[in-house]
Image (cartoon, rainbow, N blue to C red):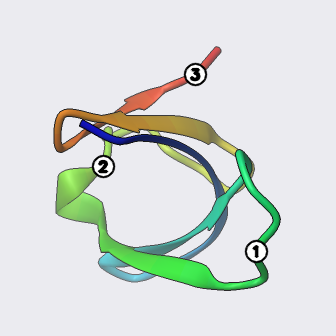
Amino acid sequence: MNTFDYVVVSIDGDYANLKRTDEESSELKLVARALLPDCIAEGTKLHYEYMEYSIVE
């Protein structure tokens, strides 16, 4: 199973734009906020593993 690290770049309504931090890429990933933890904000670091996002502290 793949694991990825992201940072929330922006929030636009029901969606958030995520940028990978574990590799160099200029592409953003658009993710429905319903799939993300409730208390995210711009700059929140996330870890994706087993089809689930969690906040990295």
Residue highlighted by disc 2: 36
Mark 2, secondary structure of its residue: loop
Q: Amino acid at mark 2?
A: Leu
Q: Amino acid at mark 3?
A: Val
Measure how far apart labels 3 and 1 are at the Cα level.
20 Å
Q: Nearer the viewer, residue 7 or 12?
A: 7
Mark 1 closeness class: few <14, some 14–19, many ≥20 residues within 10 Å? few
Figure check: 50 above or below 14: above
Q: Which corner quadrant of the image does residue 11 belong to? A: bottom right
Q: Is residue 29 left or right of residue 2?
A: right
**Sequence-earlier tag: 3 or 1:** 1
The x, y position of residue 25, in whole percent, is: 76, 74
Figure check: 6 above or below 34: above
Measure how far apart labels 2 and 3 are at the Cα level.
12 Å
Q: For the point 64% across and 41% down, which residue is it?
A: 44
Q: Nearer the viewer, residue 1 or 52?
A: 1
Mark 3, secondary structure of its residue: loop
Measure how far apart labels 1 and 2 are at the Cα level.
21 Å
Mark 2 closeness class: few <14, some 14–19, many ≥20 residues within 10 Å? some
Q: Amino acid at mark 1?
A: Ser
* Numbered label attached to residue 2: none
**Sequence-earlier tag: 2 or 3:** 2
Farthest-out residue, top: 57
From the image, state whether disc 3 or disc 1 is nearer to you: 1
* Numbered label attached to residue 56: 3
From the image, state whether disc 1 or disc 2 is nearer to you: 1
Residue highlighted by disc 1: 25
Q: Which corner quadrant of the image does residue 32 belong to? A: bottom left
